[in-house]
Amino acid sequence: MPSTSVRKLSALAARLCLLTFFGMVVTNFFVDYFAYWLTWIPLVLWLLIGFGVNRRRSGTKAEGATGPAPEPVVTAAPVTGRWKAQNSPADKVPSHGTRAYGQAYAIDIVAEPANGARPGFGWWPVARRNADFPAFGAPLLAVADATVVHTDDRQRDHLSRTSWLAILYFFVVEGIGRSLGGARRIIGNHVILDLGGGTYALYAHVRRGSLTVRPGDRVRAGQQLGQCGNSGNSTEPHVHFQLMDAADSETADGLPFTWRDIGVPANGEIFEAAPAAVAHTEGTVSGPA
């Protein structure tokens, strides 16, 4: 398996290639300095490095290339109430189309307290306020007894990207720009918990200024950590949850999970997370399902 330093250098090299491509395109717009075909070299290198990053786990235990994939880690759900799953590992792995940043088994969930309570996708309005979405401000709960290892809630919560024009901007402009900023700009505000046994839980897109814990804090299962937000590479307020084998998302491998009394909801599946699902449990994290 590639070393941590190699993984970080690969991620940096990819960002530099993309930045070089944009620099050459802008330069050629004003001055005929580079041959046209030369401008595409750094873009191709960016794609090749990105492909390599996506395949870097192919020989690891987490991806099951040398044997069966590990059994999912059993935790409580990170929320309570009625929610809908999106980009679920129950449907495909990697669930988000990439293994970068430990996302192989990540899941997105949006609040659906009632049918029609969440604004739909369409042409208008171009963007919506976060308060229009029931997930915004929802409590984020510790999935097990754990130690907080990293927090960040300084980035702003942006407007939704839930229209055709906004989603075009999201993919063509914002997505590329955020990739240049690395993991922090992709996952936005976040908190990472050490569940013990080499398992770490990451909550992404947290609401700005909402975290109530700091690195070194011990938390109990069901304790509120912060609130759901819309920071980072996010189209609307939602909870992005994943388990990893390291605290650094730049180098971590994703780990499979299952939520106690819920399982792993499939794309589009509505599920109910009751308060009892996040009650205190002995120890830090349960073993395989």
Image (cartoon, rainbow, N blue to C red):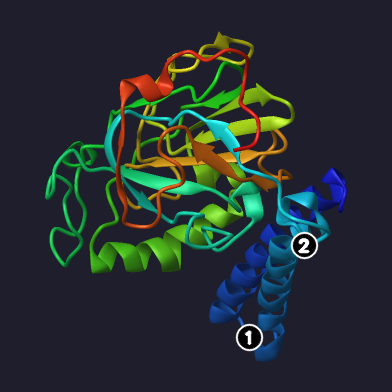
Q: Is residue 256 above or below residue 12?
A: above
Is 242 placed left or right of 12 in the picture? Answer: left
Determine the residue positioned at 12% across, 50% down: 116
**Gap between marks 2 and 1 measured at Cα:** 43 Å
- Circle 1 SS class: loop
Q: Position of residue 173 (x, y in %)?
A: 43, 64
Which residue is nearer to you in this view: 199 or 128? 199
Which residue is nearer to you in this view: 54 or 31? 54
Q: Is residue 283 visible?
A: yes
Q: Position of residue 216 (x, y in %)?
A: 64, 11
Which residue is nearer to you in this view: 273 or 240? 273
Residue position marked by numbered label 2 in the rendering: 58
Which part of the image, by quadrant, shows the C terminus? Answer: top right
Q: Position of residue 205 (x, y in %)?
A: 43, 39
Q: Quadrant of residue 255?
A: top right
Q: Is residue 182 visible?
A: no
Q: Is residue 219 above or below residue 81?
A: above
Amino acid type, residue under disc 1 in the picture: Asp
Amino acid type, residue under disc 2 in the picture: Ser
Determine the residue positioned at 47% across, 28% down: 76
Q: Quadrant of residue 256?
A: top right
Which dot marks residue 32? 1
Q: Are marks 2 and 1 in contact (CB under 8 Å)?
A: no
Among numbered discs 2 and 1, the one appearing first in the sequence: 1
Q: Quadrant of residue 246?
A: top right
Q: Give the crowd class for mark 2: few <14, some 14-19, many >=20 residues within 10 Å.
A: some
Determine the residue positioned at 68% across, 63% down: 54
Q: Give the crowd class for mark 1: few <14, some 14-19, many >=20 residues within 10 Å.
A: few
- Circle 2 SS class: helix
Which residue is nearer to you in this view: 272 or 129? 272
Labels 2, 1: front one: 2
